[in-house]
Each structure stands twice: as C-alpha cells, then as structure tokens.
Amino acid sequence: MAAAGMDLEDIGMGMIEFENPSALDIALSEKVSGMLRSAIETDGKASLVVSGGRTPVGFFHLLSQQILDWTQVTITLADERWVDADHPDSNEKLVCENLLINEARSAHYLSLKNSAPTAEEGESACHRAFADMGRFTVVILGMGDDGHTASLFPGAQALEKGLDMTSGRNCVAVTPLHAPHQRMSLTLPRLLNSQQIILHISGPSKQQMLLRANSGTDSLELPIRAILQQQTTPVAIYWAH
C-alpha cells in the first residue's frame, strides 16, 4: 500500500507514514536508489551512510537488489561498535551480510573500525579515513528510545564533542553509559554534510520520542534534537506503525 505523506501538526514536523515496515522498506529503497543514481549521473560517484540494528535489515535487502552502478557507490556507517568485523554485535557484519550482497556486492565499503585497541586510540585514523569523502549523498539514521542517534548517546562524556559544529572532526569515540561496547560515531557536522538525511523509525515509542524531542531544545538531553532542529540539511522522517 502506498504511503501517505502527512504533516503531523502535533509533532510540528513533516513525516511520511506507512502502515507497516514492509511498505516503508519498499519506498525507502526506491528513494535511496534514486538519489544514488542521480548523484552518479551528476558527479560520477555517490555515497550512502547507513545505521545498524534490526530496523534497516529489510530495507538493506531491497536496496541491494536495485540496479545501478554500485562500483561508484561508497557505503559506510553512522556508527560502529569497537569490535571485530566478525563479532555478532558488529554493524559492519550486519551491512556485509544484508546490504553488500546481490547487485550491491560491488559497492565500496569504508569501515569505521580500525586496528587500534580502543576507540579513543582509533579516532584520529578514523578522522583521516573520511577526509576525502566530501558531501554524502544520503544519510540514513535511526533513533533510540533514549533519544540517541548514531552513537551520540545522552550522558556520554564525548557527547558535547560529537555535537560541536565547530570541532572540525569527522569521528568521535564514545563510551555509552547504558549500552555495551565502546563506539565510533560520525560527528554531527559530518552527518549534516549530506544532501539528505532520512530518519528511519518504526513503532509507537518512536513517535512518542519525536513528540518529546519537539517539546524542548536541549540536544545534550536528547541528541536527536540536533538532527531534527537544525536548518543545514533536509531531513525526511520515514515512520512505520
């Protein structure tokens, strides 16, 4: 069933609403593949930033089947747990097994995880790895029930650094207060250096978080506010019941 675009006045932001995650996945794969094709036609290359977790798996499978010149596409993550790529909690493992398959197997993957023993020690190398990336074509973000996005977690010591628009940093090492593993996250300025940001969420708890995020302005309390309330980069919200 086709999605219906609606402006949810009580939330105060535009949202595209879907009856179920399957309908969202179809629409999102068509939207993203179209943006990648256009970027390749215009610039000769395209880039896609994705997020981990269970929510995007169906979208990954559908996107991997889209016909386009994947050899000109670079795929990376908004954040990564500081674990080896074969670890069950690795976002890279998730992407390799669910997105870098089918037609998309020829895309280039840029890892956030490097050989440094800790995320803090790997931060500079990660920053350098993204130095020549330029503007992203599209960034797909999730949102936690605590208001985090990427690995920009409320209460984390590195959060202020990650949200600093003047830091000049591409990556920030983060140790969440209530989640396992050290993380490497793209910073707010790096995420916003994109043609389009899409927030991909599902379930009533996410709608409630959007309402809460819209009721205040403190991004240190709810980091997702830094994405939703900025005026730099267009944000589309894809939400499924």
Image (spheres, grey):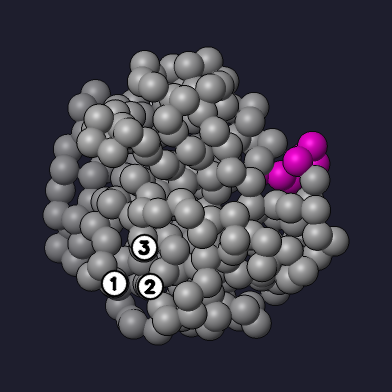
Q: At numbered mark 1, what does the secondary structure look like: helix, strand or loop? A: loop
Asked whether, in this view, residue 34 is left or right of residue 226, the answer is left
Q: Quadrant of residue 96?
A: top right
| Amino acid type, mark 3 | Leu
| Amino acid type, mark 2 | Ala
Marks 2/1 in contact by CB < 8 Å: the verdict is yes
Specify start and end residues of the magenta stretch as a single range: 85-91
**Of callouts 1 and 3, which one flags the residue occurring earlier in the amino acid sequence?**
3
**Of residues 164 and 210, the one drawn nearer to the viewer in this rendering:** 164
Badge number at residue 71: none
- Label 1 or label 3, whichever lies nearer to me, is 3
Q: Is residue 207 magenta?
A: no
* Residue behind mark 3: 192
Asked whether, in this view, residue 174 is left or right of residue 24, the answer is right
Label 1 crowding class (10 Å Cα cut-off): few <14, some 14-19, many 20+?
Answer: some
**Of residues 8 and 73, the one drawn nearer to the viewer in this rendering:** 73
Coordinates of residue 190 in the picture (x, y in percent): 44, 63
* Residue behind mark 2: 226
- Label 3 or label 2, whichever lies nearer to me, is 3
Coordinates of residue 57 in the picture (x, y in percent): 53, 32
